[in-house]
Image (cartoon, helix red, strand yellow):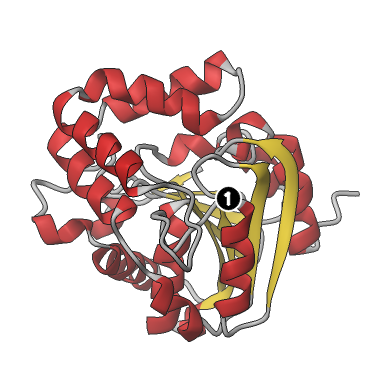
Amino acid sequence: MVMLENGLSLAINTKFMGSGEETVILAHGYGGDQTIWEKIVPHLTKKYRVLLFDWNFSPDSKLVEPSKDSYSFEAFSDDLISLVDELKLKRFVFIGHSMSGMIGCIASIKRPELFQSLILLGASPRYLNSEDYEGGLDRSVVEDILSNIESNFQTWCLSFSAVAMGVNDPLSIDKFGKSLQKMRPDIALLVGKNIFLGDHRDVLEKVEVPCTIIQTTNDVVVPISVSHYMKSKIKGKTSIEIIDADGHFPQLTAHQLLIDALDRVLGFDSD
């Protein structure tokens, strides 16, 4: 494992693992940190150089009091580009979970030459339902989520973790719930609003790099219909891999199925 000791890479706890010629970047989602990938990293490092980091909303990030604007998807995409420029990375595979999927899409529009491909795990351009779009969540549900983040944060974290996990996996529920609880509630609310009230559907038709969408069969946060919507809108060559599992966190609750899907996508022959 190599720790980086300068600039943005230090502030967001960047580290490299593995020593392959190709680089894979793993980007976690809301409420998590880089440890969310711990079950799949050992497999990926057999062939790839894996880059891990924490977004600035993560409790262990060393970015000091970033501004409100730091929590927009545009700002996150700029941070990603700044990080890979600082590390002088070229032509990597970006695996983005949940919100990080769309962050990767936005960054790929700005700097397509950097991206070998995008792997979008449980990603969504919009979570709200509307008359012509099934995002998965009614407005009343989203308003309830945001209200609980604002007024009942610690309790909400554990209940949301159980719902998002989608399976009776106490260790994974506890892991993500405690990670959520470590967030500053005001930051959690800001990021939550940008996620659950955001609409990034117009981004998809501008994405030209090859994409693979990986989706579980039953994700309460992102229905399968979102994957098919994204595939129909993304300009670049796009495919869908469906994992026969429940929940929004297959890297925790169905990691071998996710590894198998990644091997198919990446052409990883482990023999």
- Residue 172 at x, y = what percent? 53, 23
Task: Residue 21: name its quadrant.
Answer: bottom right
- Residue at the far right: name it: 271
- Residue 232 at x, y = what percent? 62, 76
Q: Nearer the viewer, residue 44 or 102?
A: 102
Picture layout, residue 145 above or below residue 263: above
On the image, numbered disc 1 is attached to which residue?
Answer: 223
- Residue 91 at x, y = what percent? 55, 76
* Residue 60 visible at all: no
Picture layout, residue 176 above or below residue 94: above
Task: Residue 166: name its quadrant.
Answer: top right
Amino acid bearing label 1:
Pro
**Residue occupying image coordinates x 63% and y 30%:** 253
**Residue occupying image coordinates x 29% and y 64%:** 79
Task: Residue 254: name its quadrant.
Answer: top right
- Residue at the far front: name it: 131
